[in-house]
Structure formats: structure tokens, C-alpha cells
Amino acid sequence: MSDSISKIYQLRFSGHEEYRNTVWKILVKDFFSKWIRMDSAVLDLGCGYGEFINNISANDRHAMDLNPESSDRLDPNIQFHQQNCSEPWSIEENSLDLVFTSNFFEHLPSKEILSQTIQQIHKHLKPNGRLIMLGPNIAALKGHYWDFWDHHVPLSDQSAGELLELHRFTVEKNIRHFLPYNMVRIRKRPLALVKLYIRLPFIWPFFGKQFLIISRKS
């Protein structure tokens, strides 16, 4: 399994690493940092090459992925957990302030596995801890959702929100149209446009194909 994941990562992201990392620096600084305190314990779930977790400021940083190559991309101060996210975590229960996941849940093999993963998230978040969930919105993408071979679980902003509520999360913010679909099979956008896009939410409905849901452990 880890070998096939490594091959997909190499095929999909090779040559895009520096650009993706710079884009995530902008996203963290200009948007996501408002939910991250310096004294937070944060987990990047399905961390990939660590573009999110490497660029945040928090005292206790964790990253989880099945791909063994992820550990080579992470800051040395980040604790890496190479494991199946639906199985018991090697993280203390009720210890995390924030779990962040981007473009990951759709890659899980089934809805049952996704449900088990949400249970693990709930178990390891502190009371009132947050889950920030970003992913492609099948309601906005239609057939283009399946343009990636390893997409298995179709999610919309509404179905993802319902899933969280079933697992005792309170949805605080549900943005149907947030970011464009991907940064892989497109011409690289000027970084100045990325910064401008984040600052102009009124244009998100025209270009955003990913939902963003911010929820709190009830």
C-alpha cells in the first residue's frame, strides 16, 4: 500500500513541490493562522509532503500519513505517525487542539473507513477542539471529481457537514466554494493572485470548487 501511495505522490507532485509549499505559506499566513495558537497541539491528517504543518507556528505539531516518504519532508520538530488513520492512534486522547485535513478524506477506501477516522479525530481532540476539513466538492465539480484515480469517497459540503454532525461535531463554518480544484494539472498561478484571491471572498463562488468546513468537538 505505501509503495503505491509513494508512486502516486511522485507522479502527481514531482516538480510542483516548491510552488505548492509557497502557496501553502500564503494560505496559512493569510487565512488559517487565525485558528492556530502558539500553544496549540496540531495534527495534519493525511499530511502529504507537509505543506501545511511545516508552515504553521505551534509548540506541538503532529503529522500522519501512510506514505513513508512524508517523514523526509517534515520539519525535524514534527512528530510523524505513519499509520492507517482509521485504526487507534499513537497520540494521547483528548490532547489535540486542532486537526487539519486537506484533500484527504476522498482518498480513503470507503465511507466506513472515513466514519472510523472521524471517530478517531473526535477521540483525540480536546473538548471544544476543532477539525478543519478542506476537500473537493462533488456538488460543484460533477464528473471532474473522478479525474484522480485514487478518489473513492464522493463528498459535498452538505454530506460532509452531516457526517460531522453524526459524529458529535458542531459545524461553525461551512463554505461551499472556497479554493479552486487543484494545483497539479493547471498552469501555475502568480502568487500575487493567490494572495489577492484569499482576501476577496466575494469571488470564491465563481472559482471555488473545494468546500471548507470548520467544526468543533461537542
Image (cartoon, rainbow, N blue to C red):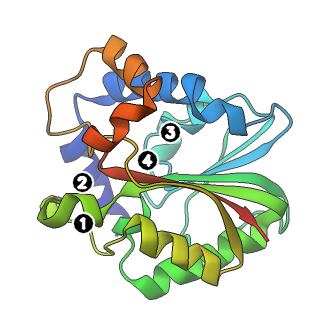
Quick one: label 4 or label 2, which is nearer the N terminus?
2
Q: Mark 3 points at which residue?
A: 50
Q: Residues within 10 Å of mark 1 (few under 14, many from 20)?
A: few
The alpha-carbon separation of the residues under discs 2 and 1 comes to: 9 Å
Inspect the image, locate mark 2, and give the three-letter code of the amino acid beneath it.
Ile
Which quarter of the figure is the N terminus placed in? Answer: bottom left
Where disc 2 sits, the SS reads helix
Quick one: label 1 or label 4, which is nearer the N terminus?
4
Quarter-wise, where is residue 166 in the image?
bottom right
The alpha-carbon separation of the residues under discs 1 and 4 comes to: 14 Å
Residue furthest top in the image = 192
Where disc 3 sits, the SS reads loop
Image location (x, y in percent) of residue 34? 69, 32
Q: Mark 2 points at which residue?
A: 8
Inspect the image, locate mark 1, and give the three-letter code of the amino acid beneath it.
Asp
Where disc 1 sits, the SS reads loop
Relative to 18, say whether 11 is above or below. below
